[in-house]
Amino acid sequence: MSNKDKLPNLRHSTAHLIAAAVLELYPGTKLTIGPAIENGFYYDFDFGEHKVSEEDFPKIEKKMAELLKSWDSFSHRELSEKEAKEYYKNNEYKLDLIDGIVKKGEKITFYKAGTFEDLCRGGHSENPKKDIGAFKLLSIAGAYWHGDEKNKMLTRIYGTAFETKKELDDYLEMLEEAKKRDHKKLGKELELFYFDETAPGMTYWLPKGFVVYNALYNFAREMYRKYGYQEVMTPQINKKDLYETSGHWFHYRDDMFISPMSFLREESKEPLEGSEVFGVKPMNCPNAMNIFKMKTRSYNDLPMRLAETSMLHRFELSGTLNGLFRTRQFRQDDAHIFISLDQVESEFDALLQMIEDMYRPFNLDYQLRFGTRGEKFMGDSKDWDIAETSLKNALDNSKRKYFTVEGEGAFYGPKIDILMKDSLGREWQTGTIQLDFQQPKNFGLKYINNKGEEVQPVTFHRAIYGSLERFLGVLIEHYAGALPMWLAPVQVVLLPIADRHIEFVEKVAKELRDAGIRVETDIRSERLQAKIRDATLQKVPFMGIIGDKEVTDEVISIRKRNGEDLGQLKIASFLKQLLQEIDKKN
């Protein structure tokens, strides 16, 4: 077994272990699925009449530890469909899984450790008793069978496992730190954003949060200009015909907001004959294809880089919504680049350089993941072969590090995802680059080449931040809310020591504000230390303290949010320092 597989297999084995423990503690419980996931595992149970909560975790963990002592190895056997269904005749979930396995033409396999046996494809520790050094149950949640709200709600128990107790302790310590950095918690405390039950998965951006949002967006627009993009804006709602042409109606319809529109007569208010079906835009690509098609294009027009950052909507299941990380309404720094086949490598190099420029201010490590065609791909296999080969060659020639995951491409083309690592070592999928031969073909896109011939272009879909909402959520947790000065909603707060200093404070504030600095004044009748504490809790990068001496000498005493004292500075000197830091985006 490779080291790459060892931890996932260990965690998958621990998922079997919790299932075995639950069956002993709660007889009659129906088992469903228990996969390894990125940082651990989960198992979904139908507990029937039993009520299980996190208070039961110590009891379950104790039983898991007892059972593990006899788990020397996993054995497996193959069963016929009839045998497997007889084994699980009282478990409708396993019967459903067996039907799915049969439909795919796969073998039905059972894996056993100790006295516990479960339907499973495999992927386990060779010696679970030795390999599973430490485990911990973490949380409990509801989960619909197959993620469908029409199905019964199951109980999902999350846990994690490691080879050593130290690794587990380090991970649990990281989780505690992550709780302090939770962007949903900080979003309210710093008055950046919040969510309301009247609009699930859609963000209320507060004034401070919208400042941050726009600062990130404006930096993306600077990059658009630098790399030769043209900005466009397209309709939010389109007839289903557009999505049928693009392929999204077949491949993506379940994730869209869809509405039949019956238009009413002005006077009678009766519906006109027939109804038209519309979809709220979940992505920009079909509209970008329409723009390219609106007139005859020449090879001199290529590459044509169209950027769009309009609002998108996707019908994410309510159980998957998670603050800014997964929303139903969001914007992307999205673009579609129309090129000839021989421009793939040069344009890809430019995209990689653009990624470097846009990630550099955050000092974040990232790696690239190459996803190839999945089972439900759209189009011709030959086109896919060309697209995958072209993108892989461009990746190889770029000398950038990447790894390949088979079957993880978009339905219309292979893709490269950006995996960003934050200050806690957590990895987040943010941006993506996708090479598409299919949608240009579906829309009948053509350009005139240098020989006067009509040729089909190919398209790069690319979003470097990905969702602005998700990227900001990651940044808030990465910085624990203390955003870099160029992004901070309030960059300077001025603190008068007494009321007689307010006039000078307002003068300084105007000078800074006129120069483009985001500045606030705290003129409350509070003690100075209370004002400093409040500004520090609000993560304001700089505090300017003004008393009698500062007014007389026309200076400001500068203190940073980390407590560092910069001494007294002339207003012009302080302003110069601020502008330099903003310009460098440190």
Image (cartoon, rainbow, N blue to C red):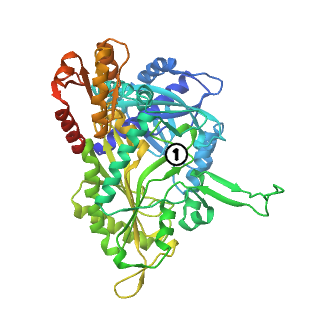
Residue 235 higher or lower than 88, as above or below: below
- Viewed as shown, does residue 278 lie left or right of 499? right
Badge 1 marks a residue whose secondary structure is strand
Residue 218 locus on image (x, y percent) = 35, 49
- Quarter of the picture holding the N terminus: top left
- Viewed as shown, does residue 154 lie left or right of 537? right
Closer to us: 450 or 551: 551
Closer to us: 467 or 271: 271
Q: Can residue 114 be seen in this view?
A: no
Residue 427 locus on image (x, y percent) = 34, 41
Residue 505 higher or lower than 352, as above or below: above
Closer to us: 424 or 130: 424
Extreme right residue here? 268
Q: Can residue 404 be seen in this view?
A: yes
Residue 212 locus on image (x, y percent) = 38, 39
Badge 1 crowding class, 10 Å Cα cut-off, few under 14, some 14 to 19, many 20 or more, is many
Q: Residue at x 55, y 59 (%)?
A: 235
Residue 512 higher or lower than 306, as above or below: above
- Viewed as shown, does residue 443 lie left or right of 398? right
- Quarter of the picture holding the C terminus: top left
Quickly name the residue at label 1. Answer: 329
Extreme top residue here? 527
Residue 376 higher or lower than 425, as above or below: below
Q: How many labels does the image show?
A: 1
Q: What residue type is labelled 1?
A: Gln
Among the 4 quarters of the image, the one containing residue 483: top left
